Image (spheres, helix red, strand yellow):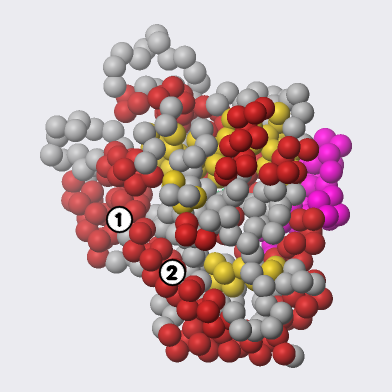
Amino acid sequence: MPGPGHEMIGKEELAELLDVMNSGYLFRYGSLHDQAFKRKVYSLEREFEAYSGANHALALTSGSAALIVALKALDIQPGDEIIVPAYTFIASYSAIIFCGGTPVLAEIDDSLTIDPEDIEKRITAKTRAIMPVHMLGNACDMDAIMEIAKRHGLIVIEDACQANGGSYKGQKLGAIGDIGTFSLNIFKTITSGDGGILITDEEDIYTRAFAVHDQGHLPNRTGVEVGSRSILGMNFRMNELTGAVALAQLRRLDGIIQILRQKKAQLKSLLQGIPAIGFRRLNDPAGDCATLCTLLLSSAAQAAGVAQQLATTTVDNSGWHVYANMEHFNRWLKEQGMPHGKGAFPRTDDTLSRAINLSVGVVDAGLGAGFGINIHSDEAEIEQIAAKIAKAFTE
Ligand SMILES: Cc1ncc(COP(=O)(O)O)c(C=O)c1O
């Protein structure tokens, strides 16, 4: 039971897939005038533009691919520094390193997203961009981040891979900075097994991103290209089968978030009464994807005790998203002579040691969210889980 989109896969996804299979044509390009070409990837991109409010959307093979394409489209060069939080998935770091850039880690705050004050402290003459990561389905402090970026002339790449459908002050996450990236892997709000999407308002960035994702070609391979391709690209193209599933899932996104918000509100209201309980601060509670509910307690010892009772883990001990637990990345940091290993980001270490991720829609032990409710939980189950949590606080 990984992500909510996965749990909702049904006849709509099957219908879209069969539409492609019956056509027998699986490649993303074809003539829009040809009835046999079902244009699922093309439609996904246009519908995602309408959904996000961005001028351009580009479908890709993964969220990691979306980050690489974004960085290449923005012409990140060797030596360029990109400020990124110490709490995120490895791909936020590895994409930067793959593109020759240098990830410069910054502390998180009590929202478990990047601390704007710490961003400011880490800006140098080499800084090109900030990569805020909307962790656990919630927005970073985008007003502060955009203000810092503007003042220092920096690019903003939003890693919204965990926050598809979330918003900040009425704007969809991913559509606030220069580029936004999304993942469609199985643990995300919606899924096509794997897949990614990139959005931007800028025509020029879109044209470059398109070229990067498809061997230097112009958008949708229109126009005369031979002899005029300006940049080298790769192949990060989405195929029609993936596009078909992603399209059906996109049409479910708002419905999924609505269900999760309702269930999370019930869970949270039942937990509010527990003395000593605390929650992660949300930069915009109204834009919450509600995929998770993060407890933030006052001491690491108390959090460890509660986590043990619930047979789960505090976030610092979860495997996948904590800088100190990424041995391969830490090796790279060490080689560069950069801060690495536990203790390098003390405020992040402390915050994560006091945090417990409860599942609401995303059930992922790798995220420390192996315990909680899910998109199918009924009121009785939510009450039961809340009672278990209350009990864990008294033992
Ligand atoms: C914050 C973040 N960035 C990037 C990615 C990479 O996405 P994908 O697995 O689709 O490559 C993930 C996926 O878990 C993520 O959580």
The outermost residue toward the top is: 227
Left or right, 121 with reference to 295? right
For badge 1, the amino acid type reads: Arg
Name the quadrant containing residue 47: top left
Tell me where residue 65 appears, x and y as whole percent: 52, 40
Q: Judge depth for marks 1 and 2 and give the one in front.
A: 2
Between 330 and 176, the one lying in front of the other is: 176
For badge 2, the amino acid type reads: Leu
Q: Is residue 10 above or below residue 273?
A: above
Label 1 sits on a secondary structure element that is loop
Q: Identify the disc placed on residue 183.
A: none
What residue range appears in magenta? 318-346
Q: Which residue is found at the position 35% from the left and 26% from the top?
A: 219
Q: CA distance from mark 1 to mark 2?
A: 16 Å
Residue 238 appears anywhere in the view:
no
In the picture of the structure, the residue carrying the numbered disc 1 is 251
Q: Which residue is found at the position 14% from the left and 34% from the top?
A: 34
Tell me where residue 52 appears, x and y as whole percent: 38, 45
Name the quadrant containing residue 351: bottom right
Q: Which residue is found at the position 43% from the left and 43% from the top?
A: 197
Label 2 sits on a secondary structure element that is helix
Left or right, 351 with reference to 6? right
Residue 132 appears anywhere in the view:
yes
Q: Identify the disc placed on residue 260.
A: 2
